[in-house]
Image: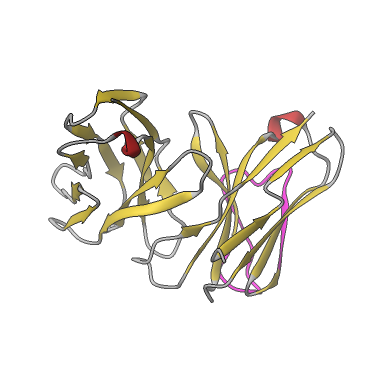
Amino acid sequence: GDSVTQMEGPVTLSEEAFLTINCTYTATGYPSLFWYVQYPGEGLQLLLKATKADDKGSNKGFEATYRKETTSFHLEKGSVQVSDSAVYFCALSPGNTPLVFGKGTRLSVIA
Amino acid sequence: DADVTQTPRNRITKTGKRIMLECSQTKGHDRMYWYRQDPGLGLRLIYYSFDVKDINKGEISDGYSVSRQAQAKFSLSLESAIPNQTALYFCATSDRTRERPQHFGDGTRLSIL
């Protein structure tokens, strides 16, 4: 079945460091791909999305490119801030069934 | 006001009790979902509903039941709570278009003693 694999955390970075969180997927057909963020004590919020191969989603300095050839959707940010500390979830939408989520990666950014 | 509202936000109860978690939405979405979040396990789908007359089991439906009372309301019940159902529960909504992502409530933290 469809699945999402994320790098395990926690990831700890210093402020202004470069961030990469790896995400790979297995799916039939052509799913849409998403990154969600969960700040402490809150529900999930959509961070960015991509709906077809080679699309780049971007928001708040974060970017991810839909790579069909490597079945990947890695999240990147050039310079993280303390306020980026959160749990990040990669997810795919296989079509007319609910989103499939990865297990989440906790990011801690220290000043 | 929040688009997706969950009540209660926190609940502590005892083993064997019946518990209902409620979710209401003002987004006008057809689809509603209940997820459970456990540390290290991410989000797992319990039940989902694509419209008022549609109920589907998710990955971990055993021990849970749901009711879709109206387009805007979707409740989750634990008929006889057990300690391993202690978790953070999220309700979510989406519209029919697959590219549209789901919108989440702020969660209900449930502790079963």
Q: Is residue B71 above or below residue B3?
A: below
Picture quarter with the C terminus of chain A: top left
Could you tell me which residue is drawn at 59 percent across and 48 percent down?
B107
Residue A35 shows in this picture: yes
Q: Judge from the rendering whether residue A80 lies leftward or rightward of residue B55; answer left or right.
A: left
Q: How many marks?
A: 0
Nearer to me, A74 or A43: A43
Could you tell me which residue is drawn at 35 percent across and 52 percent down?
A92
Q: Judge from the rendering whether residue A74 lies leftward or rightward of residue B111; answer left or right.
A: left
The quarter holding residue A74 reads: top left
Type of colouring: secondary structure
- The magenta segment is B49-68
Pinpoint residue B42: horizontal percent, then vertical percent: 48, 37
Q: Is residue B66 above or below residue B9?
A: below
Nearer to me, A51 or A10: A10
Residue A1 shows in this picture: no
Pinpoint residue B25: horizontal percent, then vertical percent: 59, 68
Nearer to me, A90 or A86: A86
Q: Is residue B37 above or below residue B69?
A: above
Pinpoint residue B24: horizontal percent, then vertical percent: 64, 65
Could you tell me which residue is drawn at 70 percent across and 30 percent down?
B84
Q: Judge from the rendering whether residue A60 lies leftward or rightward of residue B75; answer left or right.
A: left
**Magenta residues: mostly which secondary structure?**
loop
Could you tell me which residue is drawn at 52 percent across and 73 percent down?
B27
Q: Judge from the rendering whether residue B47 lies leftward or rightward of residue B85; answer left or right.
A: left
- Does B3 appear in magenta? no
The quarter holding residue B102 reads: bottom left
Pinpoint residue B72: horizontal percent, then vertical percent: 63, 72
- Does B57 appear in magenta? yes
